[in-house]
């Protein structure tokens, strides 16, 4: 049975001798006519019959021949269509994906793009098209990689300048210990730290990583404090119930940046007179950190868009996806979540705001160092159970309760992470 989409429309080639039927029938009629006429006219009738037989035979043969040519042309067209479909759907997509991953085209191209009986001209055309597409994809990937490298390079230069400014500000703080001057210097230092976080986020969007790396584990409480420091409205962050557990050194800085971006979003999209509350909770395979604001909340459409931004960044961010409104915070959190294996979800809060929940797996956590218990307001583990030890310390006095002039945001949190 012919396929439904067959170009031949279900026609089959005629049998080889079928075209002889018409000439034989004409010849039989001519012979019968010649026998039926009188003797003087028999010769003329016979010649006319022979001529008609030859004419019908020639016409029938030509019709059959052309029908076979048309059928063969349809079959060739079907084979070429099948070759083109195979080329477009099975050959080229893996090649393009491999080139986008940075692999060499020769490693993924099949030895032959088409069956052996394909039209050589078609094979040549497809090979040229393949080379053109591969070169175009390679050039595009080179441009994207250059753009990412340029962004990371720019971010690193900004970070270097910020580090220089931070060092200058620290020297000035020792040089001018007067309270009125010291308060202004600390305020400037905090603004520089906010700019440093933006530069680090820009580097992450370009494919880079936070510059600082920690070798030893750091308590989750200190990681959250460090996350709340480089945001404009840090005084609104309240750490309530924090589990007595530590974060492995390599994950400290990325995790702190995730918390920073989510806390910054929470303060940015909620009334300035409200607090942003941070809690942690032990779950089966890790720790959940919730960042809850008291804003206007999210509509279903905006929530889906926010989760799309997180998922898109987690699966691999293209700089062209940023658009005019980059929404850097969610994208940076999504990129780092993909690298660390975090899960971020946005839920309605109990105060009609937004509750961002970050799941931190046990792979990134470890036991709290003994010297860190006093810092988080807890006590070293004794005869208590593990669940009691991880239930969290009593709520400590938040650093923001002290006057801004009496503390340095960068100094306090840098000391906490040292």
Image (cartoon, rainbow, N blue to C red):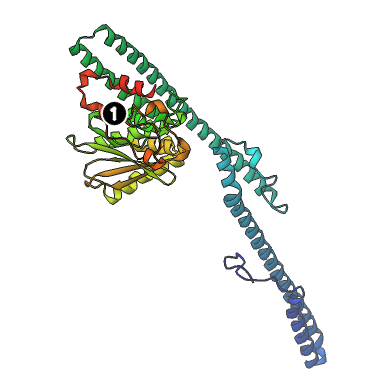
Which residue in the structure is indicated by mark 1?
A: 231
* Count of residue discs: 1
Q: Nearer the viewer, residue 154 or 410?
A: 410
The reply to whether residue 346 is in sight is yes
Is 120 above or below relative to 211? below
Q: Residue at x 79, y 80 (%)?
A: 47
Q: Position of residue 132 (x, y in %)?
A: 58, 39
Quadrant in the picture for the N terminus: bottom right
Q: Position of residue 215 (x, y in %)?
A: 47, 25
Picture residue at 55% right of the left edge, 35% below the top: 138
- Where residue 179 sits: x, y (%)? 19, 12
- Percent across and percent down for residue 253 are 41, 28
Q: Nearer the viewer, residue 270 or 351?
A: 351
Residue at 21% across, 16% down:
183
- The picture quadrant where one finds residue 260 is top left
- In this view, 239 is above or below 85: above
Q: Nearer the viewer, residue 159 or 381?
A: 381
Q: Hey, which residue is sitting farthest front in the picture?
A: 383
Q: Secondary structure at mark 1?
A: loop
Question: As drawn, is 263 to the left or to the right of 23?
Answer: left
């Amino acid at each position: 049975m012919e396929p439904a989409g067959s170009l031949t429309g279900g026609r089959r080639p005629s049998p080889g001798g079928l075209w002889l039927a018409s000439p034989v029938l004409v010849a039989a009629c001519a012979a019968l006519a010649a026998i039926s006429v009188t003797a003087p006219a028999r010769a003329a009738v016979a010649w006319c019959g022979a001529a008609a037989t030859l004419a019908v035979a020639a016409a029938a043969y030509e019709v059959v021949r052309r029908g076979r040519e048309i059928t063969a042309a349809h079959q060739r067209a079907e084979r070429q269509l099948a070759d083109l479909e195979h080329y477009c759907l099975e050959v080229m997509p893996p090649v393009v994906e491999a080139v986008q991953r940075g692999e060499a085209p020769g490693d993924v191209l099949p030895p032959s793009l088409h069956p052996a009986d394909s039209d050589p001209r078609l094979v040549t055309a497809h090979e040229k098209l393949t080379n053109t597409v591969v070169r175009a994809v390679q050039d595009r990937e080179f441009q994207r990689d250059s753009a990412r490298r340029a962004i990371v390079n720019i971010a690193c230069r900004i970070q270097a300048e910020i580090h220089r400014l931070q060092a200058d500000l620290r020297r000035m703080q020792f040089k001018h210990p007067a309270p009125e001057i010291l308060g202004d210097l600390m305020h400037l230092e905090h603004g520089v730290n906010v700019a440093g976080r933006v530069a680090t986020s820009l580097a992450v969007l370009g494919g880079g990583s936070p510059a600082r790396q920690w070798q030893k584990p750091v308590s989750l409480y200190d990681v959250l404090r460090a996350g709340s420091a480089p945001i404009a409205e840090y005084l609104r962050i309240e750490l309530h119930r924090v589990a007595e557990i530590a974060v492995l050194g390599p994950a400290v800085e990325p995790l702190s940046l995730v918390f920073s971006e989510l806390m910054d979003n929470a303060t940015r999209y909620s009334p300035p007179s409200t607090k942003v509350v941070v809690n942690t909770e032990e779950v089966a395979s890790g720790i959940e950190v919730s960042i809850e604001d008291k804003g206007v909340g999210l509509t279903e459409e905006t929530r889906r868009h926010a989760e799309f931004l997180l998922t898109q960044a987690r699966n691999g961010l293209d700089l062209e996806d940023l658009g005019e409104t980059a929404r850097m915070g969610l994208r940076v959190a999504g990129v780092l979540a993909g690298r660390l294996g975090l899960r971020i979800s946005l839920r309605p809060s109990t105060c009609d705001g937004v509750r961002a929940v970050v799941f931190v797996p046990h792979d990134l956590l470890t036991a709290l160092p003994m010297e860190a218990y006093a810092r988080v307001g807890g006590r070293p583990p004794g005869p208590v159970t593990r669940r009691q030890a991880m239930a969290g310390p009593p709520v400590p006095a938040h650093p923001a309760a002290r006057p801004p002039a009496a503390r340095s945001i960068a100094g306090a949190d840098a000391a906490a992470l040292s």
